Amino acid sequence: MDGNLTARANGVAAPEVLLRFSEVSKTYRTAQDVDAVALRPVTASLNKGEFVSLLGPSGCGKTTLLKMAAGLVRPTSGSITLADGAPLQPGCYGFVFQAAALLPWRTAIQNVLLPAEVLGLPRAAASRRAAELLEKVGLASATHKRPAELSGGMQQRVSIARALLHDPALMFMDEPFGALDAMTREELNLELQRIHLNFGKTVLFVTHDIEEAVLLSDRIFVMSAGPGRMLREISVQLDRPRSLETKRDPAFHHLVSDIRELLHGAARAAS
Amino acid sequence: MPEHIEKLAGVAPAMKTPRAAAWSAQRRQEWLASAAIAIVLIGALELAARNQWISAMIVAAPSRVMAVLAEGIADGIYLRNLAASMGALVAGFGLAFVVAVVTAGVLSSSRFLERVLTPYIVAFQSMPKVAIAPLVVLWLGFGELSKIAIVAIVCFFPMMVNTLQGLRNRNVDHYELLQSLGASRWQQFWKLRLPHAVPYIFAGVRIGAIFALIGVVVAEFVGTNSGVGFAMLQAKAQFDVPGVYACLVLLMLMGLTLNALTTVCERWVAARMGTTVDGAGH
């Protein structure tokens, strides 16, 4: 089992660290004034151009860790910084929410343009790019439709286009495909891989779906609940680009079942 | 498979047409029924008044009312009064609208202020605002100014409370989205809270318009010498029953006009909500 899980020596040049998590933890104070540990201290790093998944059951603190990385939630202790020690600035990354979080009064393209308005980017260039991005995610025909007229999968595509508009090097994604049906989900998984590879984006991706994590990731941070903590870091050495064929690869299956055992073992130990 | 889809797509509109026709036929029937009720009612009133079945002090013949109305409009009295009422109404309503939206904006941006002032808002809201009218006349005297003030006081609260409710967009994702982009509080207001409030604001405007009309009539009853309400009091004093009815018709026309204006504004804003709000933001 361990043979599959441990990271093998990497043949590529030493990775360049983009984001560094040092002893980050989160404790919430409940209404009864009791401290609830959402996440025990995590130390890890995210490398440039890498696709890393935070994988675990609900309550493992994966979304908390993601939101702390994006600066949306303040850590109780520890820090998350760029390689040079500076904190990550809002506006220089893209965030994709579990619910597409589109503004219902705006059309698809107006939603995609939101980052340009907030960041004050030149309008004409932004409009061109928004139209291009919508086309890239296969929604050219939905440009002027409002979210209510779009299916869940289409809404999530719009929100991905929105996260890409200001061309951030880093993308945070919080279970973006969790609410979608299996087919749409697979389709969007492959599309996300294309975006990751073609644009060279670094992605931090939250999911509770083991197969999705293995299919997409370079590395997986396996997390466990009660209290939330990071169990292990797993390197996924499957060739890219991956496809639905990859899911038939025995190596894929081994990895998936190893992670499943790891998660179940942790759940048993916790209960 | 594609042929299947094409077939379905081809069949669908053909099936829709008879249904649409049936629907419009039903609409026509409904319209006819509405019109028939109006004709029957007006006809019955006319008959009852002409044959003295009902006292002339209670009901005026619709034909008499129309004649008085035409006469009053021709000699300019009604138009002058209509202009006086409409002017005060628009001024008071406009003032209340601006103050309501600004107040709601300030209150919604500070939880402290909102919590501190909520008891006062509730207390004022539970008081019938028209009851302040005599007091306002004492303060501001007999005339346009107190009329405008009464209208503004009466229609301020429904608009403020509705706007306040709309500005409290509670969608956490939306806030985090803007936060992830480093949006300022000001941007949060223009991009998130104000557009979210638009339908609420219009709900407030609809109620406010009705209240404003009530306000203007009450103001003209208690403290002015112009306007449709005043003309009605005068007609009453002279036992001019058709005159009283004519004024009621004028007030109804005012109400319908306000309602139509609100609908037009609402459609216009709804059609271009994203863009208007953006324009205002820069």
Image: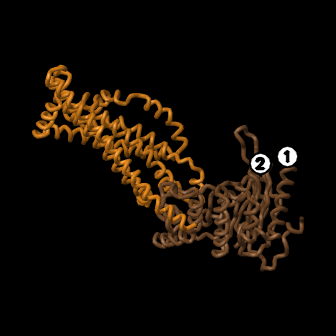
Chain colours: A brown, B orange
Instruction: Give the percent coordinates (x, y) of residue A88.
Output: 66, 64
Q: Chain of mark 1?
A: A
**Lateral position of residue A263 relative to residue B275, left or right:** right
Name the spot of residue A201 as percent of width and height, x first: 66, 71
Residue that carries the numbered disc 2 in the rendered image: A37
Q: Are marks 2 and 1 on the same chain?
A: yes
* Relative image position of residue A58 (x, y in whole percent): 74, 51
- As helix, strand or loop, the secondary structure at mark 1 comes to loop
One can see residue A127 in this view: yes
Q: Earlier in the sequence, mark 2 or mark 1?
A: 2
Residue at the image point whose x is 37% and y is 30% from the top: B129
Q: CA distance from mark 2 to mark 1?
A: 16 Å
Label 1: few (<14), some (14–19) or many (≥20) C-alpha neighbours in 10 Å = few
Which mark identifies residue B29?
Answer: none
Q: Is residue A176 left or right of residue B280?
A: right
Disc on res. A271: 1
- Badge 2: residue crowd in 10 Å (few <14, some 14–19, many ≥20): some
Q: Amino acid at mark 1?
A: Ser
Q: Please, is residue B89 above or below residue A65 in the view?
A: above
Rendered-image quadrant of the C terminus of chain B: bottom left
Instruction: Indicate left or right for B79 with B29 as reference.
Output: left
Tell me if residue A87 can be seen: no
In which quarter of the view is residue B256 placed? top left
Indicate the position of residue A115 as horizontal and vertical percent values. 54, 64
Q: Amino acid at mark 2?
A: Val
Of labels 2 and 1, the one closer to you: 1
Corner quadrant of residue B182:
bottom right
**Image height check: is A135 above or below B172?**
below
Could you tell me which residue is drawn at 77 percent across and 64 percent down? A220
Q: Is residue A200 above or below residue A95?
A: below
